[in-house]
Image: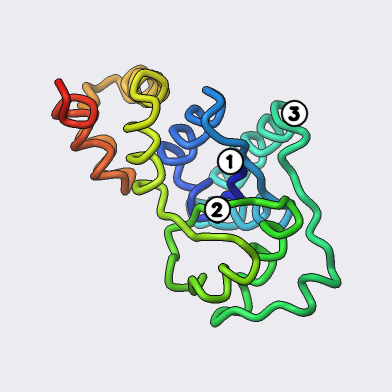
Amino acid sequence: MKVLIDACVLYPTVMREIVLNVAAKGLFAPFWSARILEEWALAAARLGASGQAVARGEIAVLRAQRPLAEIAPDPEIEARLWLPDSNDIHVLAAAISAKADIILTLNLRDFPAPILAEHQLTARHPDALLRDLLDQAPQAVSAAVEDVRQTAERLSGESQPVRKLLKKARLPRLGKALDEGVSGNT
């Protein structure tokens, strides 16, 4: 499965790290464009110059780790597309160029299903996709989340209960499922 990751999923950190850890477990192939990465850096700039500098460092690491994940959208395809928010057309163009199956975004309303269906795409919220992947590969998703939870705990110096951490990261369904035992089966 190929997944184009929107900037709103790459920033904030916890959500991005969980999504990329799950991808690293082989559950999907992640893609993005240079413009999506730039949107991430600009969003981090709201924290000040240091926020943008940290984001640019993280982007450089991401590019080095996954050099084939960055897609250059075809400008001719992009010129023919329409979405309710014209600022998202580049995301759709990147997904089409990547031959993605899914656009992973928090902004589902910006990607109407009928328009995406014309390109054999669907838009999914990260919480929904990760929750579905938890059902399919509980050990891999649990391990990916636990790695992020431990890192958050180490960096913050505070306890980071999984459900609370994931709720704050806008992944409440995944957090609830993990907190109650994977898929409610345990």
Mark 1: give few (<14), some (14-19) or many (20+) Cα within 10 Å. Answer: few
Q: Are marks 1 and 3 in contact (CB under 8 Å)?
A: no
Residue type at mark 1 is: Met
Q: Give residue 155's mark.
A: none
Specify which label sits upstream in the sequence, 1 or 2. 1
Q: Position of residue 58 (x, y in %)?
A: 62, 35
Under tag 3, what secondary structure?
Answer: helix
Residue type at mark 3 is: Ala
Q: Are marks 1 and 2 in contact (CB under 8 Å)?
A: yes
Under tag 1, what secondary structure?
Answer: loop
Is 120 left or right of 34, judged from the image as shown?
Answer: left
**Residue at image mark 2:** 102
Specify which label sits upstream in the sequence, 3 or 2. 3
Q: In this figure, which colouring scheme has been used for the structure?
A: rainbow
Name the residue: 83% across, 63% down. Answer: 74
**Residue at image mark 1:** 1
Name the residue: 50% across, 27% down. Answer: 21
Q: Position of residue 168 (x, y in %)?
A: 27, 44
Mark 2: give few (<14), some (14-19) or many (20+) Cα within 10 Å. Answer: many
